[in-house]
Image (cartoon, coloured by chain):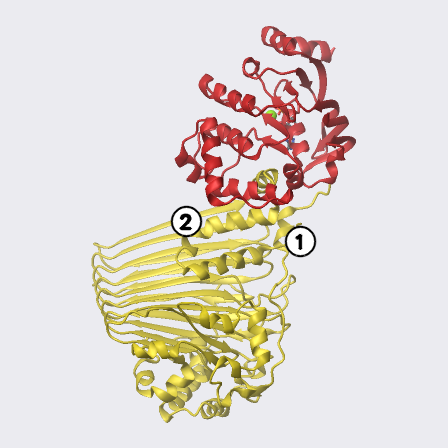
Chain colours: A red, B yellow
Amino acid sequence: MSLLKIENLKVNINGNQIIKGINLEVNAGEIHAIMGPNGSGKSTLANVLAGREDYIVTEGSVTYMGKNLFDMASEVRAREGIFLAFQYPVEIPGVSNANFMRTALNELRKFRNEEPLDAMDFLQLMREKAKLVEIDKTFLNRSVNEGFSGGEKKRNEIFQMAMLQPKLAILDETDSGLDIDALKIVANGVNKLSNENNAFVVITHYQRLLDYIIPDFVHVLYKGQIVKSGTKKLALELEEKGYDWIKKEIDM
Amino acid sequence: MEDVNIVEQITLSDYKYGFISDIENDTAPKGLSEDTVRFISEKKKEPKFMLDWRLKAYRYWLKMKEPEWANVKYPPIDYQDIYYYAAPKNSSEGPKSLEEVDPEIRKTFEKLGIPLAEQQKLAGIAVDAVLDSVSVATTFKGKLSELGIIFCSMSDAVQNHPDLIEKYIGTVVPSTDNYFAALNSAVFSDGSFCYIPKGVRCPMELSTYFRINAKSSGQFERTLIVAEEGAYVSYLEGCSAPMRDENQLHAAVVELIAEKNAEIKYSTVQNWYPGDKEGKGGIYNFVTKRGMCRGDNSKISWTQVETGSAITWKYPSCILKGDNSVGEFYSVALTNNYQQADTGTKMMHLGKNTKSRIVSKGISAGKSQNSYRGLVSVNTKATNSRNYSQCDSLLIGDKCGAHTFPYIDIGNKSSVVEHEATTSKISDDIIFYCNQRGISTEDAVGLIVNGYAKEVLNQLPMEFAVEAQKLLAISLEGSVG
Ligand SMILES: Nc1ncnc2c1ncn2[C@@H]1O[C@H](COP(=O)(O)OP(=O)(O)O)[C@@H](O)[C@H]1O
Ligand SMILES: [Mg+2]
């Protein structure tokens, strides 16, 4: 089943074209990896899919579960099952992780005409998911991302993903800045969640994450376009030869 | 996609509680003169000392100048274009029970979500509901009087307890204190009086709902609370006003007196009509609130949640006269659209080992201006005194302003004064992060604002905290779906 279909997508930021015609189809049950040098437009693509306001779509279409994605406000996209693990998660002072997640989860349930979770059930769910990504319970009472280390912020993103159980999860460089143990925890979180009804788009700079999350497809994004697609083998090739090889091929 | 500024959207908000009820008034002629003062005093059947006190204040006021130092701007007020007294018509006899209250008035309270009938049942809350200038319903009086507690309207107190009023009125806020206090002293219409005798802990929260209702009727409440030695009382004041076109002047005075070992907790949720999105209309709220910790080991704590009024000018203060006395000020002041608030506190340390704590949380949205103005003064004799001040500002959007004016004056070497301040902003990045988790912009703002204000809201009694939380969200509500 096609979950996401991107056709000839072009995106401007402040008048500059950053995404220059992308085509990509993601089916339920698949894991796609998007790789590419810094500044290629990977985060821009992720943010556009999540509904960031100041990114202007100038051409193309995106269909999500049969519907025009651009008809939905960003909070509606989230409730419809799109989740973005941010490259740079923000801090929200004064709002505890627990309170934040409870609000988010209950919004989701309201959207599906479900009753809000009662406090006990919520607490249990939170403990269970916290364990999955090996985060400390005390961390749940702290303000969202405030004073968290880079690695803690990334793990918190995976924790939130586990809580919200999205249909389409986009992970934007969740692996950067993580040591190998943290990387395994993140990968384990993804693998536990992955099933035939959901899909993952894993944006990464390095292939090492793909040793733990095995992608079905690997795409290389460069200068706002997908310049190469392949299987896991492509990632290994990139690791070996670096991006210069692709850059040379394209820039010629 | 529309390139809209989400912050702008959320800060455009409609006043939820705007409506006018239709009640006939028993009104004094427009304008201010000695005759007006006499009219009010006569209407209220006051003893002579009260009339004399009012007249003295009036004559002094004539010689005073309106203050200009606050960081607020408004067109000149025509004091001759204001009605200084308006009473609901049926009130001359006074209702004996809620059933006797004018159905129109009761409907008004119900629209505000304050059903008096239910409030009587609400455990632990006595309600002295003020509509315009005259109390229309008082409950739980019996229970309180068993303990010797007096809780009644100011008018009743002037008639029935003239000795207490004469003894205490103007002892904390003299009639000559400032321009608006002098005005209030001359023409105060009604308010609450509360007296807790020696050693008595008031067993319930005392609550008064104020509400402006009559057209162009300036509101001049006067409240006096006295806690005798070892007494304790927690008093709640809250209000919400109907939609209105013209500016209305509101100049209240509140005086608190805490004797030895006594404690007074005074909480306010202020939601007077703030004016419309263009800054038209709204209440001018010029309030003088001051407490005196007269005895040793006494404590006065002010908590306020200010969301309403076009202009707020208000500095609930503590005079820490008794040794070891404690003063506290917890404040959330929210301004939106064209609202202006200049609010803060004064902590005056006179006794030894006195302590004060200031927690001020300003929230500015829209094109509003929000100022904190505080004075901590420590007398040479107030040795070993301490103050801790925390003044935070939260900005929503980039067209609003936050300002802090902390003044510190320490007269001895053994005292310590600490001041911390932060400014933060609800950025588009934070809003987007919340949206991406399925939380709408409005709910996100509510979540963040309530988190930010938590330390202050926690000071409020439970039922008030919930109301205040809703009020903050409503005040920032906009057109975002
Ligand atoms: N807010 C912005 N304003 C202007 N240019 C931007 C903005 N955000 C990103 N860009 C530019 O868009 C390009 C792609 O950025 P990004 O999507 O973050 O790349 P990647 O995630 O692949 O490293 C870069 O050249 C970057 O400078
Ligand atoms: Mg990036």
Quarter holding residue B184: bottom left
Residue B176 seen in the figure: no
Q: Residue at x 76, y 35 (%)?
A: A68
Label 2 crowd (10 A; few <14 / some 14-19 / many >=20): some
Horizontally, is B168 left or right of B189 in the view? left
Judging by the rendered image, the residue that carries numbered circle 1 is B479
Q: Locate residue B431, reporting x and y percent.
A: 58, 42
Residue closer to the observer: A64 or B154 = A64
Confirm or reject: label 2 Cβ below 8 Å from ligand 1.
no
Residue B251 seen in the figure: yes
Residue type marked 1:
Ser
Q: In which quarter of the image is the N terminus of chain B?
A: top right
Quarter holding residue B139: bottom left
Q: Is residue B355 above or below residue B196?
A: above
Judging by the rendered image, the residue that carries numbered circle 2 is B421
Whether discs 2 and 1 lie on one chain: the answer is yes
Chain letter behind tag 2: B
Residue type marked 2:
Ala
Confirm or reject: label 1 Cβ below 8 Å from ligand 1.
no
Label 1 crowd (10 A; few <14 / some 14-19 / many >=20): some
Chain letter behind tag 1: B
Residue closer to the observer: B455 or B52 = B455
Q: Of label 2 and label 1, which has the lower sequence position? A: 2
Question: Which mark is drawn over residue A93?
Answer: none
Element carrying mark 1:
loop
Horizontally, is B418 left or right of B464 in the view? left
Marks 2/1 in contact by CB < 8 Å: the verdict is no
Element carrying mark 2:
strand
Q: Locate residue B94, reporting x and y percent.
A: 48, 87
Q: Locate residue B295, reporting x and y percent.
A: 23, 69
